[in-house]
Image: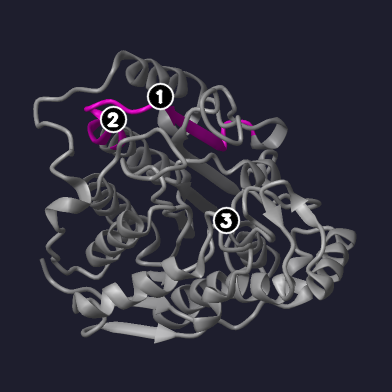
């Protein structure tokens, strides 16, 4: 495996999240993941590291309603209130969210305009934020803002958004549900067993955007989970992107689907994450010649999240790392495992209703 050029957006301000000590989201994960990358030697060769340029209010308004931004800024001053029951206000939340959105924007611009190879933002991936509301631990939707920025400035005409977070990106899907310039593809746990209760296979877009939304929900995990994930990604990503012909790719690479994560019921492992990274990276090379931004996402067990992100970034950088046995405890799928029947049924449905998969 030869090393590859890779950009990383790292900013100490990513660690300033202030939801509270009992909240699942902690800045420690960002800090420990970046530290692990250094210890593993991933940052040594062909790596560009840059800080985030905070998003401006004008950039936020590409997606978010002015009154919503005004309300966030007000709560940010006092630290009083909540965006939702799981997303409490904290002092400086507006400024913090602007740094995180800016991390994704900064990396995307550097990839698309300056360097022409993928960038990773160590934060971001806030796909639960809607134009007029936050939730799911998310304040502003960096993924949607980045896509809208490229489209508004006529830099790109077609953007693909891939999500592999355990939780369906309901905000991102809603924003682009009628938009034929953006193809959204999401692999996540079914909404029948996990927040936010959306992202079913029959949600394929509407009006001009019909057929531009692909959802592949997984049932709660079994011993074949990794096989199901890799099988679905391999069947969908290459064909969909080849037919859609994106100019730029955004990948929300949440790892809360890991077997040890407390906030999902899936059973994926670092081996599964590495396999899908190989598939998605090849699709990036073939379709956009390296123009892509990869963001973080969920991941609420500190050890598994740090090692999962490290395993993904290692593949993106073309480097090999050793994953300690205790991270996955040899729980990846047996080579003889096969996907459960529902997996094949969902693919047949998508092939029938989504032209990019025909």
Residue at x 54% of width, y 44% of height: 183
- How did the renderer colour the structure? one colour
- Left or right: 268 as drawn, with respect to 138: left
Q: Is residue 162 visible?
A: yes
**Is residue 216 left or right of 63 when viewed as pictured?**
left
* Side of 237 relative to 3 (left or right): right
Q: Quadrant of the C terminus?
A: top left
* N-terminal-most mark, 2 or 3: 3
Question: Which mark identifies residue 228?
Answer: 2
Q: Is residue 43 magenta?
A: no
Whole-percent x, y for residue 207 in the image: 72, 31
From the top left corner, tell me how far across and down residue 280 is, in percent: 32, 51
Which residue occupies 72% across, 68% down?
Answer: 90
**Disc number at residue 219?**
1
- Which residue in the protein does label 3 denote? 23
Whether residue 121 is visible: no
Magenta span: 210-229
Q: In which quarter of the view is residue 69 placed? A: bottom right
The residue depicted at 17 percent of the width and 38 percent of the height is 331
Secondary element type, mark 3: loop
In this view, the mark in front (2 or 1): 1
């Amino acid at each position: 495996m030869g090393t590859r050029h890779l950009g990383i957006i790292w900013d100490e301000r990513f660690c300033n999240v202030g939801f509270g000590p009992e909240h699942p989201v902690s800045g420690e994960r960002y800090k420990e993941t970046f530290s692990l990358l250094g210890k593993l030697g991933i940052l040594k060769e062909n790596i560009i590291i840059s800080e985030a340029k905070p998003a401006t209010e004008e950039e936020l308004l590409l997606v978010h309603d002015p009154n919503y931004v005004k309300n966030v800024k007000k709560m940010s001053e006092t630290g009083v209130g909540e965006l939702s029951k799981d997303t409490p206000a904290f002092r400086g939340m507006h400024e913090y969210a602007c740094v995180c959105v800016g991390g994704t924007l900064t990396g995307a611009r550097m990839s698309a305009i300056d360097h022409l190879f993928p960038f990773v933002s160590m934060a971001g991936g806030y796909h639960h934020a809607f134009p007029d509301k936050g939730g799911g631990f998310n304040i502003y939707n960096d993924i949607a803002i980045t896509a809208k920025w490229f489209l508004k400035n006529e830099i790109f005409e077609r953007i693909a958004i891939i999500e592999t977070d355990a939780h369906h990106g309901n905000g991102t899907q809603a924003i682009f549900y009628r938009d034929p310039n953006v193809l959204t593809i999401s692999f996540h746990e079914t909404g029948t067993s996990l927040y936010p209760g959306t992202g079913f296979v029959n949600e394929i877009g509407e009006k001009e955007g019909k057929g531009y939304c692909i959802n592949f929900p997984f049932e709660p995990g079994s011993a074949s989970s990794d096989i199901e994930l890799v099988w679905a990604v391999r069947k969908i990503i290459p064909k969909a992107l080849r037919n859609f012909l994106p100019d730029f790719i955004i990948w929300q690479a949440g790892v809360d689907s890991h077997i040890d994560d407390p906030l999902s019921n899936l059973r994926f492992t670092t081996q599964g994450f590495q396999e899908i990274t190989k598939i998605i990276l090849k699709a990036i090379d073939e379709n956009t010649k390296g123009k892509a931004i990869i963001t973080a996402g969920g991941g609420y067990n500190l050890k598994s999240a740090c090692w999962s992100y490290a395993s993904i970034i290692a593949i993106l950088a073309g480097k090999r790392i050793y994953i300690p046995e205790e991270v996955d405890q040899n729980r990846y799928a047996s080579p003889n495992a096969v996907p459960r029947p529902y997996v094949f049924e969902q693919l047949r449905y998508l092939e029938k209703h989504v032209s990019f998969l025909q």
